[in-house]
Image (spheres, rainbow, N blue to C red):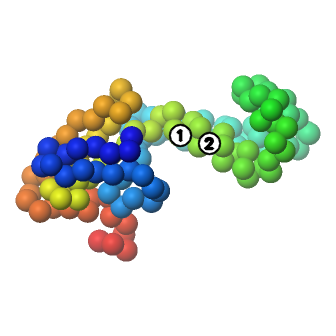
Amino acid sequence: MSKLLCTCGNTIRDNTSSLPYKAAFLKDVDCEPFSDWFVGEIQSYVTAVEQGEVHRWLLDRGYSEEYIALGLDHGNLLHDHIHGQFIALRRTAYECTACGRLHMETAKDNSFVTYTPGSAGKKGVFATKSEE
């Protein structure tokens, strides 16, 4: 998504990274399975490294020979693997910087439902601890 029109008329733009009004989240029902998958995949990868079987490990998870031929280091391989799973499960939310409405992505990609804050002027729900 590059922009979303809020009910108040404000245009919410998503054309860069680290936006203070954007959040990526996992539904509660996905958190524990993702965590279990994460730990299992890390342990499995470490075992594959110790046994010299990283190539097989990647093939078993659907990576192409072209991807494997890139020769990425362990950190980048794991980043891609974990990030891919997170992307598959995550949903996106935006807070309108003008009115504070939350726009939450539904199960259908790029479809959002809007929630209005209960208190007028309440903004910054995605602020970092240092911004509160």
Q: CA distance from mark 2 to mark 1?
A: 6 Å
Tell me the tag on residue 82. Answer: 2
The residue that mark 1 highlights is 86
**Residue sitting nearer the eye, 8 or 53:** 8
Residue at screen point 28% across, 43% down:
4
Callout 2–callout 1 Cβ contact below 8 Å:
yes
Classify 7 as above or below 67.
Answer: below
**Residue sitting nearer the eye, 109 or 83:** 109
Classify 97 as above or below 9.
Answer: below
Quadrant showing the C terminus: bottom left
Residue 112 image point, x, y percent: 27, 35
Identity, as a three-letter code, of the amino acid under mark 2: Ile
Residue 123 image point, x, y percent: 20, 61
Q: Examine the rendering and report whether any part of residue 54 can be seen.
A: no
Q: Is residue 14 left or right of residue 35?
A: left
Quadrant showing the N terminus: top left
Q: Secondary structure at mark 2?
A: helix
Q: Examine the rendering and report whether any part of residue 96 can be seen.
A: yes
Residue at screen point 24% across, 50% down:
11
Residue 5 image point, x, y percent: 23, 44
